[in-house]
Amino acid sequence: MIKRSAHEQRRSRRMVFLGLTLVVLGGLVAFAGSAVAEEVLPPASVVPGSAPADGLRELPTLSAAQEARAAAIALAHPAVSSLVSGKPVSTLIVPWMTRKDSTLLGAGIEFTWNKPVEVSGTWPAIYYDETEQINPPYVASSAVVSAGNVTGVHASVDLRSGRLVRLEPMPGSQVTRYEADPRDRAGLPPQPQNPR
């Protein structure tokens, strides 16, 4: 047996004390962290289709069949087909829903490409009902459009009616004119003063 000096014994006791202190502190930090996590983290996800515990509605999604149908409807429109034909195009499809209660209206589709083009013509447009009192919550219209440096368009497809109802140049385009028929606005109920 090796005999330690008094100095080594004191040092060894200090190291043991320090080690025990760190273990206790680590346990307290872990306990406090789990308590905070229980208060801050959202509840576990719920079974799809059931009402979430926090009362929020699940957002609608599009099936593969709905996405394919929406893309086919948009691509069948002459304004879209003339823009995308003969060039590599990327497509992003997302649900289009009401703002108030997230009811699925159809699909929002972004068609993008690399080489900028100039566009002009009459495209489908809508006046959206900010109050969402009418069904569907928009009035169909058409817009006279002129824009340069266009590398993409956003299309809104109403899946219930099976129609492309809105087509707009993507941000970054140099839009010189996008003018919907103001007479169509008369079909809307009174709108808020500060629409979103």
Image: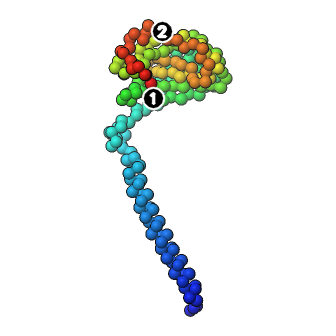
Question: What residue is shown at x 43% (from left), y 32% (from top)?
Answer: 61
Residue 42 location in percent, x, y? 39, 46
Q: Mark number for residue 95?
A: 1
Residue lying at the far top of the rendered structure: 183
Alpha carbons under labels 1 and 2: distance apart: 26 Å
Q: Residue 138 sits in which quadrant?
A: top left
Residue lying at the far right of the rendered structure: 115
Question: What residue is shown at x 57% (from left), y 10% (from top)?
Answer: 121
Quadrant holding the C terminus: top left
Nearer the observer, 88 or 103: 103
Q: Mark number for residue 181?
A: 2
Nearer the observer, 52 or 157: 52
Quadrant holding the N terminus: bottom right
Amino acid at pointer 1? Pro
Q: Residue 54 sits in which quadrant?
A: top left
Relative horizontal placement of residue 53, taking residue 154 as reference (left or right): left
Relative horizontal placement of residue 57, taking residue 90 as reference (left or right): left
Residue 124 location in percent, x, y? 49, 14
Q: Are marks 1 and 2 in contact (CB under 8 Å)?
A: no
Is residue 138 visible in the rendered image? The answer is yes
Disc on the earlier residue, 1 or 2: 1
Relative horizontal placement of residue 47, taking residue 96 as reference (left or right): left
Question: What residue is shown at x 46% (from left), y 12% (from top)?
Answer: 141
> What secondary structure is marked by label 2?
loop
Relative horizontal placement of residue 113, taking residue 192 as reference (left or right): right
Q: Residues within 10 Å of mark 2 (few under 14, many from 20)?
A: some
Residue 173 location in percent, x, y? 61, 21
Amino acid at pointer 2? Asp
> What secondary structure is marked by label 1?
strand
Q: Residues within 10 Å of mark 1 (few under 14, many from 20)?
A: many
Question: What residue is shown at x 57% (from left), y 13% (from top)?
Answer: 177
